[in-house]
Amino acid sequence: MRTKNKSLFTLISVCSILVASPPVLNVYVIPFDNIKDDVAISWLSDAFAEMVNKELSQHDRIYLKDKAGLEEVMTNRSLLLQQRPGTKNLLMLGKFERSLAKISISLQLIDIASWDELDRRKMRGDYNDVTGMNRLLTESVNMMLTPYLPKPIKSPYPTLTEGKRMRTPPTYAEKAIDVSSSIDDAILELEKKLDLNIGARGEEDPKALREENGEWVLDISPKSYEDSRPENQFNTTMMVDVLGSLMSNPYEVKLERPQFNYDPDNRKEFQISLPVQYQLKGSIIKDMLKSLPYSGLKQDGNLTVFYFNRDKYNFPKDISEKIQLGTYRSIPVVQLLDQTGKPLAVLVDSPDQGIHGLQSDRVLFKPFRFFSPLIDFAVGGWSMQVSLETVDIPVEYTFKMDVNSANKISRVSLKFIPENELHTFLNKIL
């Protein structure tokens, strides 16, 4: 009885400590982004992150996380619910670039729970003065985090032990393991076996980990993934919506007015220049991070790669076929139209040699090869990969056109046509 009372007292004491503990602040610091991929200063990517870590490690009740910690919490966002009430999770994003002997640094403070930007700072230092850059960086970090530093709640009871500050705060589950008993685990296991024998818990899952004649066996054959898992349906529905949008309309275009200049060698023709800039829509990566629990994340400069596996998703057949056949790829087609909507010139930006060999007697047809896809997919039996490249593709389409036809141009239209439908689309207007 005394042992039982002692265990109960210990459990109550641990729970009281957990409840009374003030909230903490988790700060995720990842290597800074080298915007221009300048090899000569690539070492600053890790150096700036280490400066931030060193400064924040001096604060009590701030727990530092690295890139692996960020991937873990973004993969399983339910981990945020297992933390102490009031705990905040903030991401420190940094970017830098060099201009002559100056280094420009920009910082963003992101709330991981909502992915909202809480603060933004910019600073500029001398490349030859690392100490000065360290001072500017740490001062900015301190100012950004000051409003979010947890204020410890003074307890009316004396602390049991002083202890050393931990790098990572234990979760409720880890605390429970410390106070749990191996006897309880044995009793639960015995009850489970008894329930299975009498049919109270149904039958054991043949695909789950099991022991056969002293050998532990786990079935991971592709057949175990063929049937759709009901528990993955919610994630799959979100994935279909997000990937459907990515495949159908991922690009944003900046289209400027064309410039008309007389050809110095032929006054009956214009030299026409049409500037266009292609880029991914700015909300795409944010939507991917916020809505889809991914199994892995890789970032290399401007390239971001998301990994999804069958443990959390049922890969729909139509999505898998689009990726395998490449029908999600699209090609920009520019049309210069008159007032009635009749095309006068058609510009196609495609690497397809068959497209480059087309000719037309009805309109001016010009093929180009400047545009590159900024999004790519790959799917296999076990996982799916989505690659996004956040760069701008500035293009200037230049061509010649007779003056009379050029004077009739009243509208410019740019549309992305699926690659597998491009020939059919062009045959109707050429």
Image (cartoon, rainbow, N blue to C red):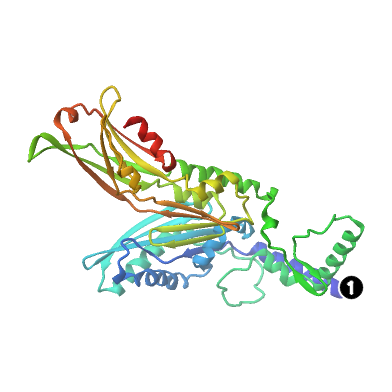
The answer to whether one can see residue 151 in this image is no
Closer to us: 340 or 70: 340
User: Horizontally, is 219 left or right of 50 in the view?
Assistant: right
Residue at (49% x, 66% y) in the render: 67
Seen at 31% across and 50% down, the residue is: 393
Give the x, y percent position of residue 425: 39, 34
**On-image quarter of the C terminus:** top left
Which amino acid lies under the numbered mark 1 shown in the image of this protein? Met
Dividing the picture into quadrants, the one containing residue 54 is bottom left
Quarter in which the N terminus is drawn: bottom right
Eyeballing the image, is 238 above or below 210? above
Q: Is residue 303 left or right of residue 383?
A: left
Residue annotated with mark 1: 1
Q: Nearer the viewer, residue 174 or 340?
A: 340
Q: Residue furthest right?
A: 198
Name the foreground residue: 91 vs 265. 265
Residue 338 visible in this rendered orientation of the protein = yes
Residue 83 x/y as whole percent: 62, 60
In the image, residue 166 lies at what x, y percent? Answer: 57, 73
